[in-house]
Each structure stands twice: as C-alpha cells, then as structure tokens.
Image (cartoon, rainbow, N blue to C red):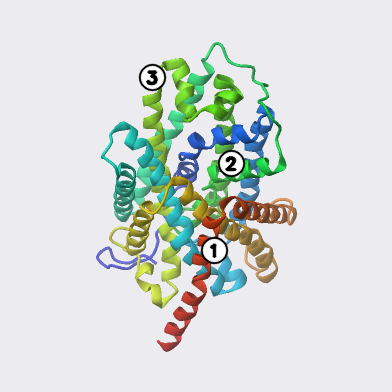
Amino acid sequence: MVTDENTSCGAPIRVLGLFDSICIIVGIIVGTGIFMTPMAIAGMIPSVPLILLAWILGGALCVAGGFCYAELAATYPKAGGEYVYFCRAFGPWAGFLFSWSKMLVIRTGSIAAMAYAFGTYAEQVFSLGAHSIPLYAGFAILLLTGLNILGVRVGSLGQNILTVAKVGGVLGVLIVALMQPSSPPVMEVGGGSTTLSNFMIAMILILWTYGGWNETAYVAAEVRNPEKNLPRSILYGTMFVIVLYTAINGAFLWTLGITGVAGSKAVAADCLATVLGESGRRIISVLVLLSALGAVNGLILTGARISYAMGSERSLFRLLGQWSSRFGGPIWALVFQGILSAILVWTGTFEALVTYTAAAAWIFFALVPLSLLVLRQQDPDTPRIYRVPLYPFIPILFLLCCLSMMYSSITYAGIGALLGFLIVLSGIPAYWVSRRVERGG
C-alpha cells in the first residue's frame, strides 16, 4: 500500500534494485574485520595453505546459509527477515524473541562494535582527548542514523558510494601488495602446529568478518522484483566477498609472510608501508574509516526494519512500527536503535562488544535452516520461485555448523556470552506483557 506523501504513516515501497541490494551486503561484510582479524588468525593457524582454506571454508558456509536465506526471502519478501520466517515456522513468540534480541543485543551491539572500530582509527588521524573513540563512534552512529531517517533512497545512495569507495580501496591494497618485488615464500609455515581448538576459534573470527551476507532479507519489502533480486543479491554479494577476502589475505601473506602477519598490529598498514612507506599507513587509515562507515550505515539501514516488523504487529511497540511516507522509512525504529547503539559504545571495548553479540547471534542463525525445513512441510502450497539446491543436505549442514559455532562462541566469549543470553531471555517476560496488553485492548 502506498499512502499520500503528507501522511505520517505508510508502508514500504519497492525502490531498491539489484545493485543497491548487493551494495548493502558487500558494504556490511567489508567492514573493519578484514583489517583486524588476519593477525590473530595467522597466530592460531601457522600454515599459509590452511589459512587460505579457512577463509574459503568460512565463505562456503556463508554461501550455504545464503541458499537458505535466498529461498526464505524470495518466498516471503516482507520487511523483517528472520522475524517473518520464525513467526510463520514456530509462532509469534519466536519472531518476538528474535526482534527483541536483535534490538537489545545483536544488532545494536554490532553497530556499536563497528562504530567503535571507526572511532579507534579516527583517533589516529585527529585526537579529541581522552574520550576520542566513543565520541567519534557516537557521532558516526547519530550522523548515519540521521541520513537513514531521510529515507531508504538517501540511505542506500550513501551505502552505494561508501561500498564502491572501500571496495576500490581494498582492490588497491591488493594490487599494491602484489607489486612487492621481494616477497617471502608463499608456502612458508610458521612455528607451532594447528589444533582443532585454535582452528575453531579462528573460524569464529573469520565468520564474524564475513558477517552481513544475509542483510538484504531485512529490506525485502523494499526490493524491486524480490523473487529474483533477493537470491541473486545474497549469492552474488557473498561470492564476491569470498574472492576478495581470500585474495587480500593472500596479498598480506605474500608481502609479509605468515610470521610477519601474525606479529603485526595493523597488517594492512604494514603491508602498504613495505611498498609506499609511511604514506601507505595514512592511506590505509582512510580506507579503514570508509569501511567502518559503510558497515555502520548498512547495519543501521537494515536493522531498523527488524524493529519495525515487530512494532507493526505488537501494540506495545507500535511506535517502532510506524512507517513515514514522507521520508520512506521507519523513523522511530531508527531513532531508538541509534540511541541504544550510541549508549553501548560507552560501555566497553571492541572485543567486549563483539563477544556480547556472537553467541546470541548463532542461536538465531541456527533457527534459519530449521525454519526452512519446517516451512517446507507446513507451507507446501506457497509458490517457491527459488529453492535451495541439494535440499535437505545444505540446510542440515548449515544447521550443524551453526550449532558448532554457537558452542565455540560460548567457550570463547565466557561472561560476555552469558550477559547476552540473559538479555535474550528477558524477551520472554516482555512477550508475555505484550500479549497481555493486546488482550486487554
């Protein structure tokens, strides 16, 4: 439904094309992770072939998940992503718990973590004093939230520009790194051996770096020709990033060697410095800032659609479910998300914010292939223009991988995971209260 421009409430309009959708995915995935995780991974997996295999394997798992999301998003092209699928497969309580967790833990924590990374690098360019990092991070969140309040056209345009700029920058780093004439042996093996425990922890970091491959599902109601463009954007975007990430890690290893990567504090900066000197460090700082901004903007744009989906169906949260026809977006959902994310920036470090979200996120990732399996049985008559290949092998494989990553995340995160779980569980009484409010109405 499209309403008059002067009214305050309306409905999503399909204005995003295939390129816009791919830019949302690539823009969120290619954040700061690719500049922050390779050093730790090289320390855990002291073998160049195994490192590259791990990045390819991580990407392959995302593609398997992408197949599941592609079928669900094309079959149920509505705003909210998993909220829609979980409500249909398991009941409204599951969709509510997902939105509650995204709103208070997973999405807002991810926005805060990425903004914190932006603040960390911005401080290196110009310090604002003792609180430079949270000040820069909070400013980025509020600025980009304001940009998205102006509407999905403005938000997606900003996302497209940031994505093209930073992908071009990453490709530039790749080309410059390969210009290095005296590279260490590519097949160099570092000291020590790779244990299964270290490999699984490395996979947590790799899959976190790949995070965002499912984001188009949240703006499904705003994508043109969703039956074709949603699956294409998820699969094309993810496969592009697999190639990009594997290549850039190969470039780091080619330039610095595995011991150099493992011992680096800023691998991309050290990589460029070997060819361009100190000017290379300044170049990479600007690139990381662009990457962080693109990721924050994409997370803000898509995340508010989850709260909107819940608010449009729950009277207790009806304010979040208001869609502005004038601007073309869920204004109050964006405002609430922006304020909470800005507050979280002041509560911890980058690592604390990541561990705060990881374990809880994998719970709901595991429910996606499970919901696909359930809906194939419960809802067989709904037309499915796109179907997961090798069904049910791929959904079951992805489900098992999610459960494994959830266990590894709990082991790795410790108290941070417990805090995230407690907030997720607080959604149960919140759901009960919302049901009582609706029955009373």
Say if residue 1 shows up in the picture: yes
> Which is nearer the N-term, disc 2 or disc 1?
2
Tag on residue 19? none
* Residue type indicated by callout 1: Phe
Q: Give whichever of discs 2 and 3 has the lower sequence position.
A: 2
- Which residue type carries mark 3? Glu
Res. 302 image quadrant: bottom left
Give the labeled residue for mark 3.
Answer: 278
Residues at discs 2 and 3 in contact (Cβ within 8 Å): no
Residue at disc 1, secondary structure = helix
* Cα–Cα gap, marks 2 and 1: 22 Å
Mark 3: give few (<14), some (14-19) or many (20+) Cα within 10 Å. few
* Residues packed near mark 1 inside 10 Å, few (<14), some (14 to 19) or many (20 plus): many
Query: What x and y, as percent, mark residue 321?
Result: 38, 68
Q: Which mark is residue 206?
A: 2
**Frontmost residue, 43 versus 148:** 43
Q: Earlier in the sequence, mark 1 or mark 3?
A: 3
Residue sitting nearer the eye, 263 or 377: 263
Label 3 SS: helix
